[in-house]
Image (cartoon, rainbow, N blue to C red):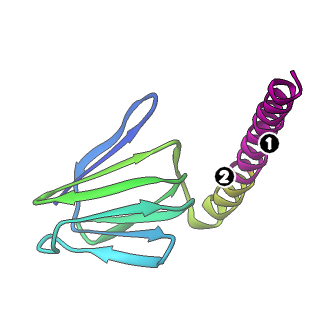
């Protein structure tokens, strides 16, 4: 199976692997070479792939995993390779960043909604 991880900055990883473990919003899952084709939204977490039977761990930000035939593509905002203990801290940082970005987006939407309502009220009072 071929694993290709694509980040906004370019291709992070492109190599042959034995199997892949990843995390979605519904929990962890494992892909083997003859697994059916699948598409899954990934949450910030640890993605592990096995190369020649040896595990390699990556911290991966939220993204999308698509398996089609022999190719597994992962598109994510960020990915970091390292040791498992260190990667857990990186995942926690990614989750915090995602939470802060979500709060900022909600605040921006609330401001837009308030401006829209004010505009409607001004139109009605004229």
Q: Name the residue tied to disc 2.
A: 94
Residue under the image location 32 percent in, 76 percent down: 30
Residue 123 figure quarter: top right
Position above or below: 85 against 8: below
Q: Distance between the residues labelled 2 and 1?
A: 24 Å
Q: Name the residue tied to disc 1.
A: 110
Foreground of the two, 88 or 125 = 125
- Residue 49 visible in the picture: yes
Horizontal arrangement in the rendering, residue 49 relative to residue 101 (left or right): left
The segment highlighted magenta reads 97-126
Horizontal arrangement in the rendering, residue 22 relative to residue 52 (left or right): right
Q: Label the magenta part by its dominant secondary structure.
A: helix
Horizontal arrangement in the rendering, residue 125 relative to residue 23 (left or right): right
At which x and y percent is residue 35? 17, 74
At which x and y percent is residue 113? 76, 39
Lower position in the chain sequence, tag 2 or tag 1: 2
Foreground of the two, 40 or 48 = 40
Foreground of the two, 33 or 26 = 26
Residue under the image location 68 percent in, 57 percent down: 95
Magenta stretch: includes residue 102: yes
Residue 13 figure quarter: top left
Q: Label 2: how many residues lie within 10 Å, few (<14), some (14-19) or many (20+)?
A: many
- Residue 56 visible in the picture: no
At which x and y percent is residue 126? 86, 21
Q: Is mark 2 on a helix, strand or loop?
A: helix
At which x and y percent is residue 60? 51, 54
Residue under the image location 21 percent in, 67 percent down: 18
């Amino acid at each position: 199976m071929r694993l290709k991880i694509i980040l906004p900055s370019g291709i992070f990883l492109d190599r042959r692997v034995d199997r892949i473990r990843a995390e979605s919003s519904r929990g962890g899952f494992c892909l083997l070479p003859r697994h059916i084709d699948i598409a899954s939204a990934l949450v910030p977490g640890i993605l592990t792939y096995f190369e020649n039977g040896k595990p390699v761990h990556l911290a991966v930000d939220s993204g999308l995993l698509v398996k089609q035939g022999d190719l597994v593509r992962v598109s994510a905002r960020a990915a970091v390779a390292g040791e498992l203990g260190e990667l857990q801290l990186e995942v926690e940082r990614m989750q915090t960043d995602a939470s802060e970005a979500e709060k900022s987006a909600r605040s921006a939407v609330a401001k837009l909604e308030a401006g829209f309502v004010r505009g409607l009220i001004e139109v009605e009072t004229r």
